[in-house]
Amino acid sequence: MKKWITACLALLILHGCSSGVNLDEHFSLNGEVTDLQAVNQNKELFHTDDMEGEIWLAAFIFTHCDTVCMPMTYNMSELQKQLDAENLDYQFVSFTVDPERDTPDVLKSYGDQFEVDYANWDFVSGYEQEDAELFANRGFLSPAAQVEGSDQFVHSTSLYLMVGDRILEKYDMSVDVPYEEIVEAVELLQDY
C-alpha cells in the first residue's frame, strides 16, 4: 500500500511539473518557420531566432495593398485588444511581402493608422523580395509573389499561431474572424 501511494504521489508531482499542453492534440499544423532576419518599424533588428519559446502570431501584408491587407490588419488590431484584455503574453509579427517599398517608416505609418500597440507588434522588412517569397513558401506553405504586370502581391490572408519556430494553427483574418477561438488558443499556450 505504501509503494502504491508513493507511486501515485510521484505521478502527480511529475504531471504537475509539465505544461500539460500536448500541441499535437490541440493544433492541426506542425510546420516549422525558416530563419529570417529583418528590421521592425522602429529600425530595430528582428530575427525569427529571437522568438524561441515565445507565443507569436504572424501574418503577411503589404502597405499599398488594394484588397485584403487593411481589413486583415484592422482585424488583428481588434484581436490585439481582446488578447490584451485577457492579459495574455504574445507577440504579433506582420511580414511585408513588398520589402522594397515597405521601409520601416512606411510600416510605422501603416501601423499608426490602426492605433496598434507596438509593445507587442512588429511590422518587419529589410530583407530582399526573394527572401520574403521563400520565407512564406517554404515555412508557411503559403503563396507570396508579385502579380505579373502589377504593383500588387499574392499572399496568404491567414494569421499563423506559433510557438518558437513551430507553426501550430492558421486562422483566416479576412472575413468571419474566429476571435474567441484564437484567444482561447493563445490562453492555452500561456503555460507551455
Image (cartoon, rainbow, N blue to C red):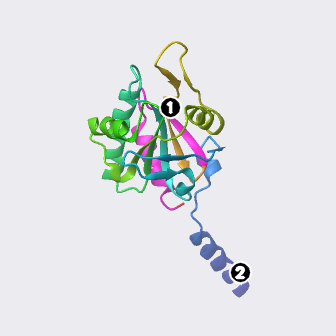
Q: In the figure, 31 relative to 86: above or below?
A: above
Residue that appears at 39% across and 47% down: 121
Residue that appears at 57% across and 71% down: 16
Q: Earlier in the sequence, mark 2 or mark 1?
A: 2
Q: How many marks?
A: 2
Return the residue nearer the eye: 9 or 107. 107
**Label 1 packing within 10 angstroms: few (<14), some (14-19), many (20+):** many
**Label 2 packing within 10 angstroms: few (<14), some (14-19), many (20+):** few
Judged from the image, the secondary structure of the residue bearing numbered disc 2 is helix
Amino acid type, label 2: Trp
Label 2 vs label 1, nearer the camera:
1
Q: In the figure, 137 relative to 44: above or below?
A: above
Mark 2 → mark 1, Cα distance in angstroms:
59 Å
Identify the disc placed on residue 163: none
| Residues rendered magenta in the picture | 166-191
Q: Which residue is mark 2?
A: 4
Return the residue nearer the eye: 29 or 67. 67
Q: In the picture provided, is 105 more to the left or to the right than 152?
A: left
Return the residue nearer the eye: 34 or 187. 34
Tell me residue 12's x, y (percent): 61, 74
Indicate whether residue 99 is drawn in magenta.
Answer: no
Residue 27 position by quadrant: top right
Residue that appears at 55% across and 32% down: 129
